[in-house]
Amino acid sequence: MSCRFHSTMTVLLLLAASSAAQLVGGSLGVIDLTAQQVSVVSPTGQVSVVSPVGGFGGTGIPQSLLWDDEAPDGFFVGGDGFVGRLTMSLQGAPTWQLLSSAVGEVASMSRTGASTLFLYDGGADVVWQLDLGTGVLTQVASTTTPWGAALNAGLYDSAAGVHVIGGANGLWTLDGSGAVTTIASGWSTGISFVTALLLEPATGQYLAALSGVDRVVRVLPGGGLQDLTAPGAITFPNALDLDVSTGEILVGGLAGQVFRLPAAGGPPILEAATGSGALVTGVARTRAVFRVVLEDQGAGAALIAMVDLDPVAIEGGMASSFNVSQPLGQGPLMGFTPDAFTLALITAFPAAQPGNPIHFTLPPLPGLFPSIPFAMPSGIVPVGVTFDLVGAATDAQGQVMLTPVLRVTLMP
């Protein structure tokens, strides 16, 4: 049972959204519980609400949110009877991929490595390990469960090799052997649940949001709790995330509001408001990842974008190759293996031109690539043929910035 106020299959659903767009660094994902929606707040404050057509799965009530740093165009979304991945698109509707419906209530999620997602199930009061490659769901064993029927939040501390579990008036660690250790308890004489947990990389300490007492705290060695802001300064704190660019802590509360707190603590400052008026149970800040994105449009056509260009860059470009003989990203030049097509493209455009996706000037001009995606027509690349794409940008000092290599096969 969770008091959060907040057979494996794969399904793709189209989603309707208001102004849904590619995720850029600094965007903020927000779950509004009672509104049953995921919102994305852009760095400029524009709010896009993503509403599923056909539902997320389960009861359709989302509870938890985690940015996918391995595939930075989307979020993992967990809720009542489902966990899946929401991927933003270059144009039109995002997609929803159901990863598992064999869960109770996914109150929290934690990522480790490229293929493992830990789920903290407040319905079944257990921890699950989800293999993202196979879809296999495995329960993480524990010798005792002092949280009883009140598991309400969790995270995985990969450095310590332990899960941190939050429940009613208690915090525990669960190690690889299944042993459980109490790290904090008894902070309230009334009912108080851990509603969110966060690992602070700079200190290795855990941060917790506590309902019933409206506190956001740092868990100290020995089990003491240090308030990061005055108790009651944020009503119903229910979600936590770290803004790695500033070191500040993001806290979701009532009325669709997200606040930020200095790492050392202090008064909360309003960071964003979705306008929903709902309780925020999930917050996830995206980071800038310089990358090439390609969306297959069918019949050999595609949309291509370059995302999160460094603002100091003065020109950029893309190169492609049909030589995919090496493992992805392990080619001898820029991570890929050039061929005659690569050379032909590069030599065809020796000078940068505004809007030219092969070699373009920066900053980008409105209405031209890379301000908008490049619409590659059918016929340039044969359908069914695999090729690699890589993007590059240079600054005034000649420093080169490269994207990861993208390997693509266009579908009919």
Image: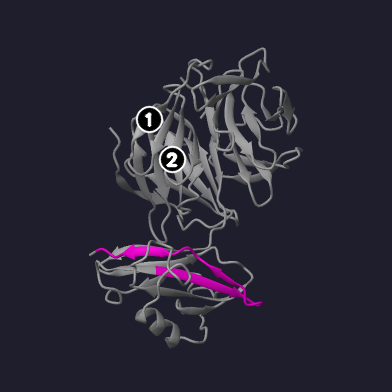
Residue 18 lies, in percent from the top left, at: 45, 53
Are the residues flagged by discs 1 and 2 in contact, CB closer than 8 Å?
Answer: no
Residue at mark 2: 116
Give the alpha-carbon distance from disc 1 to disc 2, as whole Å.
11 Å
What range is drawn magenta here? 389-411
Q: Is residue 274 above or below residue 367?
A: above
Residue 392 lies, in percent from the top left, at: 51, 72
Q: Is residue 407 magenta?
A: yes
> In this rendering, would 91 be left or right of 155?
left
Q: Earlier in the sequence, mark 1 or mark 2?
A: 2
Q: Amino acid at mark 1?
A: Thr
Residue at mark 1: 138
Using a 10 Å C-alpha cutoff, classify the residue at mark 2 as few (fewer than 14 neighbours), some (14 to 19) or many (20 or more): some
Q: Is residue 27 above or below residue 159?
A: below
Q: Secondary structure at mark 2?
A: strand
Residue 111 or residue 305, whichever sits in front = 111
Residue 137 lies, in percent from the top left, at: 36, 33
**What secondary structure predominates along the stretch shown in magenta?**
strand
State which quadrant residue 389 falls in: bottom left
Q: How is the image coloured?
A: one colour
Residue positioned 49% across, 41% down in the render = 112
Q: Secondary structure at mark 1?
A: strand
Q: Quadrant of the C terminus?
A: bottom left
> In this rendering, would 372 be left or right of 14?
right
Residue 352 lies, in percent from the top left, at: 52, 83
Q: Amino acid at mark 2?
A: Thr
The reply to whether residue 373 is visible in this rendering is no
Q: Which mark is residue 306?
A: none
Q: Is residue 93 above or below residue 241?
A: below
Using a 10 Å C-alpha cutoff, classify the residue at mark 1 as few (fewer than 14 neighbours), some (14 to 19) or many (20 or more): few
The reply to whether residue 365 is visible in this rendering is yes
